[in-house]
Every structure is written in structure tokens, then in C-alpha cells.
Image: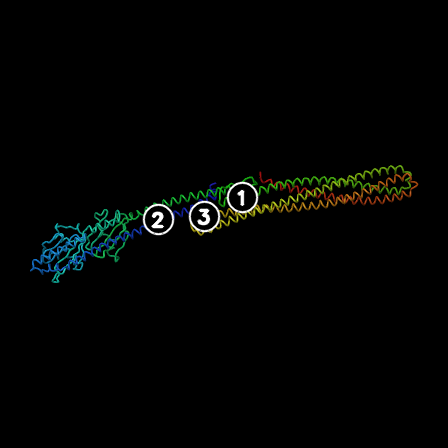
């Protein structure tokens, strides 16, 4: 049962609808993967761009610091003051020192990210944001960490991440204050004597770096750091205690790379992280960030949730729609098969109820019209078969009566023949025993009277035979009329069969039209590509139904052709019976004519016998006349015998014709019964 149900059109359609469902799921998976790859790629690109922009921003600020440092280093007041050129001019020297201090303060006020500016010279006082301060010998600075870093940078100018000597010597707190600055630009300057007599140090606030990184907001769980040329790390992010980029292989790979920026996925704390770096164009520093892959995939998870929800919803809708359509089609096909099964079993009282406005509705209406037409045709065939059966019974009964009458007539004719033969014998005996005629006159008179009685009886029998033959003629004419009626009814039946053929042609046209519609649907489905495959299967199933309808119509057409062939044979047989009846009618006419002749001869015989009776009285006197009369009687007897022989042959021919008519009537009755039994297989009421 399960196997049969699975092979049904509903199961096939539902199964076919699962194909687009699977494709929808596949589309969801592919879309999710594509979206995932796209989001990750975009995230990587945007993060890289963001980091590059920060690096450019840092580089721009460093370039700005460099420009301001160069501007300050080339100031005439600074050159004059630290060259000691105004040593003899106290007021001018104080004015120059104040001018340098004001310029330092102006630079700091203009740039909000400027933390402090230090000027250390071999002459005079040092300058910072706090004012002037007493400097120690510049030789100590030359041996400091800052001087070594400057030397490594080329000896003229360079960027460092810390300056411990300046922090301890010149800062207001006299201690390491790295939390206040991030970058430091150290540059030697040339005085008015064109000698390098001091150093200029500009500190960039640490908040410049930390605030910029914080505002960039790479996300929760990220670690972002700026590593200066001298190895100082300024790190912002989550869980950064004890973390450093400097000891990581991927950092060393990035610094050793010729690329200005790049990214890679690296393992960290059992999880994959996106490592992005961007080298600053100024300051020989590098900006790095670590972004958890899980953070990147958070955006993908939203897409995944939406994709899964849409895929599930689309799959459910597709399954519901597919089940609804498949159930509707299966129901229509099941009802159609049930009705056609009843029709194939002969039940034409059924009808197909399809409440649809599509091709199935048209098919249902066509099937109902076919059943209605078949019901009307079978009804007409039932009436015609009953009429043919009744007519065949009448013909059979009439032929039996005709056969009996003809047989009786043959017996009578045989008796007449025997009587005439006996008469001829008696006449010959009369001629031989003419000499004894006188002695046997009484006996002859008695015999003559007896012969007269026989002649009268013969005349009566002949009259009866004529009546019987007339009745037989009437029956033959009635049989001919009935045969014509049978032929007409069978021809009407043949026309009805032709109507069925036209109906079958209509069914074939409908099936061909349905097949054409299915072909068009298949073409449209093929044009639709993958989305039209489910509809292509539905079109294929419709084409199969059309082919099955066409095959069934052709099968009915074959049955109708067989009925038409049988009808042609019946018409031919009936026409042969009509011809036989016509020939029988002619034979009956000849029989009537023969009976007329016999009647005339018998009447003549009677008259002669009367004459014999009259002449017997005067036999002696009219012996010669008697001999002549006997000769005449002998001749007449011979003619009567010949006529009787001819009548006997005619009656035998008529008897054979009647037997043939009876056989034809029996065959017609059997064919009518076969037709009636065939028609009874159909139920029309």
C-alpha cells in the first residue's frame, strides 16, 4: 500500500516540490557562505582601511610636529640666544629668550595634542612649557638614551617613544612621565654661528594616540597598539595586561615585510584573531590591532539567523503549496480514474465532478460530455437491438410457418402427382380393357364418381394451396418490409457508431491539445531554468495523462470500429435475406401461376370426368368417342403429371428458400442477441 501510494502522482509531485526546497536550502547555505565571505572580506578591508587612516592621521600629526620643530629651530631669536651672540646685550638677550618662550607656548597652544617642548642648549637656560630652567652641561645629554636614539636615527632628528634622561632632569616632576606623552621628536639645531649648539624635543600627548584608537572602536575584545621605532608600545583594548606585540612572530614578520600594511589570521588564547598592521609614513612606527574572529562573525550570525529563518519559511511555504497543489491534482486524477474505471465496466450513470477552472476542469467537462454521448448512443443501441431481436423472432416465426405450409403443400403436390400417375395408369388400363368396359361399366361409373370426388377434393386442395401461397406471399412481403426496417435500424446504428467516432475524435483533439499545452509548459519550464524544474515534472505528468486519455479513446475507437464492421456484416446478411425474400416472392408468384394452371387442368379433368359419366351411359353407342376421350384423358394426365412434377420442383425450391430464410432469421436473431448482451454490459439508468 505504501509503495503504491509512493508511486502516485501526489507523492511524485510532493517529491518534486522537495527539489526546489532542497535548492532553497542550498541557496540559503550558499548565500550564507557568500554573505559570510563578503562580510568578512568587507570587515577585513574596512578594518585595514580604518587602521591605515589612523596611521595616516598619526603620520600627518608627526609631520606637523616636524614642521613646527623646524620652524622653531630656524627662529632667529633661538639662534641668537643659544649662540651667545647677545651676551653683551642683556636686554636684547632677555627679549630673545622671552620671544623663544612665547613661540614655544604659542606652538603648544595652537596644537592641542602638544604635551611639552624642551630646548636644551650649550649656552643660556633651557626652555619648556613651565618656563626657563637651569641646564647642566650638555655633555651629559650626549651620553643619554635620547642622544643614542638620535644617533641611530641619523644624528640630526628622529622620533622616540620615551626620553628618560629628560624626564629625570628637566621635567617638573623629575621622574618618568611616559603616561603623559606618546611620541617625542628630538632634533639638533644650528645657532647663529652655524654650529649645532643644542637640542629641541617636542612631546606629543599620549591621549592623542589613546583617544584616536578608542574612537576608532575596533570592537569588543580587540587589542590595538602603537609600537614606536625604539620599541615603546602604547596598547589599548580588552585584557591587555602583560600583552606585548614585540615578542610575537607575526609582529616581527610584519615589521620585516616590505608591505606598508597587511593582515593575517593568527592564533591567540585558543582562538583565531585577525592581525592587521599599518606602518606610519613618519616616525618609523607601526600601528597594529588584533580583532577576534568571533567579533567579525557576529555580523555573519545575524545574516545566518535571517537566512535560516527565510530558508525555513520558504521551505515550509513551498512544501505547503506543493502539498496543496499535489493533493488537488491527485484528487482530480483519482476521481477521474474512478469514473473512467466505472465507465470501462459499463456503468454510464456516473459523472465526474470537478470544481476547477483549469485544464482539469475542461478535461472533466469533456469526459462528462463523452459519458453523456455514450449513454445516449448505448440507449439507442439498446432500443435498436431490442427491435432487431423482436423482428428476428417475427421473421423466424413467419419463416417456420411458411416452412410448414410449404411442406404441407409439397405433400399435397406429391399426392396430386401420385393421383395423376394413378389416373394415367387407369386410363391405360381402360384402353387395354376397353373390351371389358361394358361389363365393368358400373364399376367404371363408380370409379368415375370417385375420380370426380378426388378431382373436386384436388380442386379444393389447390384452392387452399393458392390461399396458402397468397398468405406466404403476404408473409414474404412482410418479411421483406421487416428486413428493410432491420437494415434501416442497423444503418442508424452505424450512424450512431459514426457519432461515437466523432466523439472519440473530439477526445483525441482534447488529448492532443492537452499534450500541446504540456509541451508549451515544458518549454516555458526549460526557459525558466532551475526554477521551472518542479513545473516541468507537473507538465510531464499532464502529458502522460493526455497520452493515457488518447490511448483510451483509441481503444474505444477500435471497439466502435469492430461494432461498425459487425454492423456492416449484419447489413450485408439482411440485404441477402431481403434478396432471398424477393426471390421467394417471385417463386411464390410462379407457384400461384402453376396452381392456377393446375386448377384449370383439374377443372378440365372434372369436366372430362363429367363427360365420362355422361358418356358411360351411352358407352356402347359412343365407344369410339370414349376411346378418343380416353386418349384425351391420357394426354391430359401426362400434361398434369408434367405440371405436377414442375410444381413439385418449384415447391422443393421454395422449401429450400424457406429453410435458408429460417437460417438467416436465426443468424439475425443470434447476432441481435449478441448485440443486446453487449449493450446490456452498459448501465445507462
Ranked by sequence position, the earlier of labels 2 and 3 is 2
Judged left or right of residue 593, residue 445 is right
Ranked by sequence position, the earlier of labels 3 and 1 is 1
What residue sits right under mark 2 in the picture?
32
- Asked if the residue under mark 1 is in contact with the one under mark 2, i.e. CB atoms within 8 Å, the reply is no
Image x and y of residue 381, in percent: 61, 42
What residue sits right under mark 3 in the picture?
535
Instruction: Say which of 554 and 81 sits in front.
Output: 81
Q: Residues within 10 Å of mark 3 (few under 14, many from 20)?
A: many
**Residue displayed at 46% across by 51% down:** 524
Q: Residues within 10 Å of mark 2 (few under 14, many from 20)?
A: many
Q: Which numbered marker is on residue 367? A: 1
Distance CA(mark 2)–CA(mark 3): 27 Å
**Residue displayed at 51% across by 46% down:** 545
Instruction: Say which of 636 and 350 sits in front.
Output: 350
Circle 3: element type: helix
The colour scheme of the drawn protein is: rainbow
Circle 1: element type: helix
Judged left or right of residue 537, residue 295 is left
**Residue displayed at 88% across by 41% down:** 430
Placement of the C terminus among the 4 image quadrants: top right
Instruction: Say which of 332 and 109 sits in front.
Output: 109
Image x and y of residue 59, in percent: 22, 55
Image x and y of residue 409, in percent: 76, 40
Q: Quadrant of residue 462?
A: top right
Image x and y of residue 640, in percent: 82, 44
Circle 2: element type: helix
Ranked by sequence position, the earlier of labels 2 and 1 is 2
Q: Nearer the viewer, mark 2 or mark 1?
A: 1
Q: Residue furthest right?
A: 621
Judged left or right of residue 160, residue 540 is right
Q: Quadrant of residue 464?
A: top right
Amino acid at each position: 500500500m505504501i509503495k503504491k501510494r509512493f508511486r502516485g502522482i501526489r507523492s511524485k509531485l510532493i517529491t518534486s516540490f522537495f527539489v526546489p526546497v532542497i535548492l532553497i536550502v542550498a541557496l540559503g547555505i550558499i548565500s550564507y557562505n557568500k554573505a559570510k565571505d563578503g562580510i568578512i572580506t568587507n570587515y577585513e578591508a574596512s578594518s585595514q582601511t580604518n587602521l591605515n587612516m589612523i596611521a595616516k592621521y598619526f603620520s600627518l600629526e608627526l609631520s606637523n610636529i616636524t614642521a613646527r620643530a623646524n620652524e622653531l629651530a630656524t627662529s632667529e631669536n633661538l639662534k641668537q640666544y643659544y649662540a651667545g651672540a647677545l651676551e653683551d646685550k642683556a636686554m636684547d638677550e632677555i627679549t630673545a629668550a622671552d620671544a623663544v618662550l612665547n613661540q614655544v607656548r604659542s606652538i603648544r597652544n595652537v596644537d592641542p595634542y602638544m604635551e611639552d617642548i624642551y630646548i636644551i642648549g650649550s649656552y643660556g637656560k633651557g626652555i619648556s612649557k613651565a618656563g626657563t630652567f637651569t641646564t647642566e652641561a650638555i655633555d651629559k645629554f650626549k651620553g643619554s638614551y635620547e642622544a643614542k636614539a638620535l644617533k641611530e636615527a641619523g644624528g640630526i632628528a628622529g622620533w622616540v617613544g620615551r626620553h628618560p634622561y629628560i624626564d629625570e632632569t628637566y621635567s617638573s616632576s623629575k621622574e618618568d612621565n611616559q603616561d603623559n606623552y606618546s611620541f617625542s621628536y628630538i632634533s639638533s639645531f644650528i645657532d647663529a654661528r652655524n654650529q649645532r649648539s643644542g637640542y629641541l624635543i617636542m612631546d606629543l600627548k599620549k591621549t592623542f594616540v589613546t583617544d584616536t584608537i578608542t574612537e576608532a572602536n575596533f570592537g569588543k575584545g580587540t587589542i590595538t597598539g602603537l609600537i614606536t621605532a625604539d620599541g615603546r608600545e602604547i596598547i589599548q583594548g580588552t585584557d591587555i595586561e602583560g600583552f606585548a606585540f614585540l615578542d610575537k612572530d607575526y609582529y616581527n614578520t610584519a615589521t620585516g615585510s616590505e608591505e606598508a600594511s597587511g593582515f593575517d589570521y593568527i592564533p591567540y588564547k585558543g582562538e583565531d584573531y585577525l592581525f592587521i598592521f599599518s606602518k606610519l609614513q613618519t616616525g618609523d612606527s607601526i600601528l597594529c590591532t588584533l580583532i577576534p574572529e568571533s567579533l567579525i562573525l557576529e555580523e555573519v550570525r545575524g545574516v545566518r539567523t535571517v537566512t535560516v529563518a527565510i530558508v525555513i519559511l520558504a521551505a515550509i511555504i513551498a512544501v505547503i503549496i506543493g502539498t496543496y497543489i499535489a493533493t488537488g491534482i491527485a484528487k482530480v486524477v483519482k476521481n477521474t480514474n474512478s469514473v473512467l474505471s466505472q465507465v470501462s465496466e459499463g456503468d454510464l450513470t456516473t459523472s465526474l465532478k470537478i470544481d476547477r477552472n483549469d485544464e482539469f476542469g475542461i478535461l472533466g467537462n469533456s469526459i462528462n460530455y463523452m459519458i453523456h454521448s455514450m449513454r445516449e448512443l448505448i440507449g439507442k443501441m439498446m432500443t435498436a437491438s431490442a427491435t432487431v431481436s423482436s423482428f428476428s423472432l417475427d421473421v423466424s416465426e413467419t419463416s417456420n410457418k411458411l416452412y410448414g405450409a410449404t411442406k404441407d403443400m409439397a405433400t399435397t403436390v406429391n399426392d396430386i402427382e401420385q393421383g395423376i400417375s394413378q389416373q394415367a395408369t387407369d386410363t391405360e388400363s381402360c384402353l387395354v380393357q376397353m373390351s371389358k368396359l361394358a361389363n365393368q361399366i358400373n364399376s367404371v361409373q363408380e370409379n368415375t364418381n370417385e375420380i370426380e370426388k378426388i378431382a373436386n377434393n384436388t380442386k379444393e386442395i389447390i384452392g387452399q394451396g393458392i390461399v396458402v401461397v397468397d398468405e406466404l406471399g403476404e408473409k414474404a412481403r412482410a418479411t421483406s418490409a421487416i428486413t428493410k426496417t432491420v437494415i434501416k435500424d442497423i444503418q442508424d446504428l452505424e450512424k450512431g457508431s459514426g457519432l461515437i467516432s466523432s466523439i472519440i475524435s473530439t477526445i483525441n483533439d482534447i488529448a492532443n491539445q492537452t499534450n500541446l499545452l504540456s509541451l508549451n509548459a515544458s518549454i516555458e519550464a526549460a526557459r525558466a531554468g532551475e526554477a521551472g524544474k518542479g513545473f516541468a515534472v507537473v507538465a510531464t505528468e499532464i502529458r502522460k495523462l493526455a497520452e493515457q486519455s488518447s490511448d483510451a479513446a483509441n481503444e474505444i475507437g477500435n471497439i466502435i470500429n469492430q461494432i461498425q464492421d459487425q454492423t456492416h456484416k449484419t447489413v450485408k446478411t439482411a440485404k441477402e435475406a431481403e434478396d432471398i425474400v424477393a426471390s421467394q416472392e417471385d417463386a411464390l408468384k410462379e407457384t400461384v401461376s402453376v396452381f392456377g394452371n393446375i386448377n384449370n387442368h383439374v377443372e378440365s379433368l372434372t369436366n372430362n370426368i363429367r363427360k365420362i359419366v355422361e358418356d358411360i351411359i351411352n358407352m356402347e353407342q359412343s365407344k369410339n368417342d370414349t376411346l378418343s376421350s380416353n386418349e384425351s384423358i391420357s394426354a391430359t394426365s401426362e400434361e398434369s403429371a408434367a405440371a405436377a412434377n414442375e410444381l413439385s420442383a418449384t415447391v422443393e425450391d421454395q422449401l429450400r428458400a424457406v429453410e435458408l430464410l429460417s437460417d438467416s432469421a436465426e443468424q439475425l436473431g443470434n447476432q441481435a442477441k449478441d448485440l443486446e448482451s453487449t449493450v446490456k454490459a452498459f448501465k445507462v439508468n
